[in-house]
Amino acid sequence: NMNLDANVYGKDQYVIFKLAKHTYCIYSLFVKELINIKSYPITKIPYTPDFIMGIINLKGSFYTVVDLKKFIGFDADESDEIETKTEGKVIVIESSELKLALYVDDIVNIINIAKECIVYKNELNLDNLFINAEAYIDNNVYNMLNIDKLINDQRLYIDSAN
């Protein structure tokens, strides 16, 4: 289990993950845990959008599992991976409103990214991919997941009234 311990990881830590052919990163302060999906049975929920894989029970709390590739809208053919839904890695995030488990192709690393390496972007095509900044380190480009846009996306708020 890849545990994120606040004492070990400083404030500039980012979790690096793969999504289709893209390399993303997410600020570790938003990340509660990193898990392997095969250890957690997914309960399917009827009548939900196809990017919602179901819910998992993590230590007594329920998290909605979101296929991040489908959610962002990557085409199926953009995926290098064979769609094995048992091998994926999951980034568990928690905001006051949402408990989400983001299903990604792979979790690559946890690294420090200094502020001066980060360039904030204001481009529509990046915004559509939920990217609000890019980090440049050793000739690698990391796309920063726009977590605010993600957790405020209305598609994640399933109307529980009916």
Image (cartoon, rainbow, N blue to C red):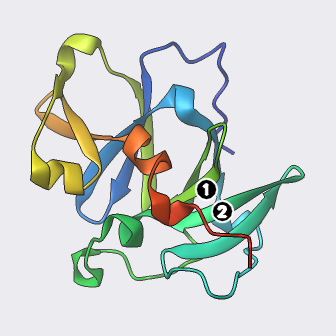
Query: What residue sits 49% from the left and 82% below the top?
Result: 50
* Looking at the image, residue 34 lies above or below residue 68: above
Contact, CB < 8 Å: mark 2 with mark 1?
A: yes
Query: What residue sits 75% from the left and 65% below the top?
Result: 56
Q: Is mark 2 on a helix, strand or loop?
A: strand
* Looking at the image, residue 115 lies above or below residue 87: above
As measured in the structure, the alpha-carbon distance from the residue carrying label 2 to the one carrying label 1 is 6 Å
Which of labels 2 and 1 is toward the front? 2
Q: Is mark 1 on a helix, strand or loop?
A: strand
* Residue 25 x/y as whole percent: 36, 39
Quadrant housing residue 22: bottom left
Query: What residue sits 66% from the left and 62% below the top?
Result: 64
* Residue 101 x/y as whole percent: 61, 56
Q: Residue furthest front?
A: 161
* Residue 67 x/y as whole percent: 48, 68
Q: Is residue 104 visible?
A: no
The residue singled out by tag 2 in the image is 64
